[in-house]
Image (tube, rainbow, N blue to C red):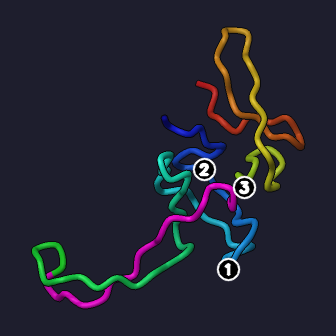
């Protein structure tokens, strides 16, 4: 069963705990099976790669590793603060994510 996460691809998030606490970045990938997210520029690891058409040089490549989703908080576009997420039903029946602090929409309505 797929886990429902409070963040989506493209969200700007703040890392709330751990080694990278306080760093801000955009969510590149969401991994619901692992309950993890990959955030741009956060949790960089060095990976050894063999010579291949994609990596003609080979050697070490820096790339982002997954972080547990509970460690990140979305930043509200309305108030600019990291927040918890609430759900809200619109008049037309759609469900969107809203900021728990100011009530602003986190999802693009359109």
Circle 1 SS class: loop
* Residue 6, placed above or below residue 75: above
Q: Quadrant of the C terminus?
A: top right
For the residues carrying marks 2 and 1, which lies nearer the camera in this image? 1
The x and y percentages for residue 30 are 50, 50
* Foreground: disc 3 or disc 2: 3
Query: Is 42 in the magenta?
Result: no
Considering every residue shown, the one lying at the far top of the view is 92
Q: Which residue is mark 2?
A: 11
Q: Is residue 109 above or below residue 98?
A: above
Earlier residue among tags 1 and 3? 1
Q: Residue at x 68, y 27 (%)?
A: 96
Residue 80, position in %: x, y?
Answer: 80, 53
Q: Residue at x 88, y 40 (%)?
A: 102
Q: Secondary structure at mark 2?
A: loop
**Could you say whether the residue bearing mark 3 is in a helix, strand or loop?**
strand
CA gap between label 3 and label 2 equals: 10 Å
Q: Provide the residue designation for mark 1.
A: 19
Bounds of the magenta segment: 56-73
Q: Is residue 22 left or right of residue 102?
A: left
Determine which of the numbered discs, if any, sits on residue 73 in the image.
3
Ranked by sequence position, the earlier of labels 2 and 1 is 2
Q: Is residue 13 above or below residue 59?
A: above
**Is residue 59 found inside the magenta-colored segment of the image?**
yes
Q: Is residue 51 left or right of residue 30?
A: left
Please identify the quarter of the rendering in which residue 89 is found: top right
Choose the circle earlier in sequence order: 3 or 2.
2
- Percent across and percent down for residue 86 are 78, 35
């Amino acid at each position: 069963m797929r886990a429902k996460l409070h963040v989506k691809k493209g969200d700007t998030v703040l890392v709330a705990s751990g080694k990278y606490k306080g760093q801000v970045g955009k969510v590149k990938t969401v991994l619901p099976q692992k309950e993890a997210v990959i955030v741009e520029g956060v949790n960089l690891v060095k990976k050894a790669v063999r010579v291949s058409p994609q990596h003609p040089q080979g050697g070490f490549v820096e790339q982002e590793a997954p972080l547990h989703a509970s460690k990140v908080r979305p930043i509200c576009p309305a108030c600019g603060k990291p927040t918890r997420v609430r759900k809200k039903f619109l008049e037309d029946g759609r469900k969107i994510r809203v900021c728990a602090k100011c009530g602003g929409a986190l999802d693009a309505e359109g």
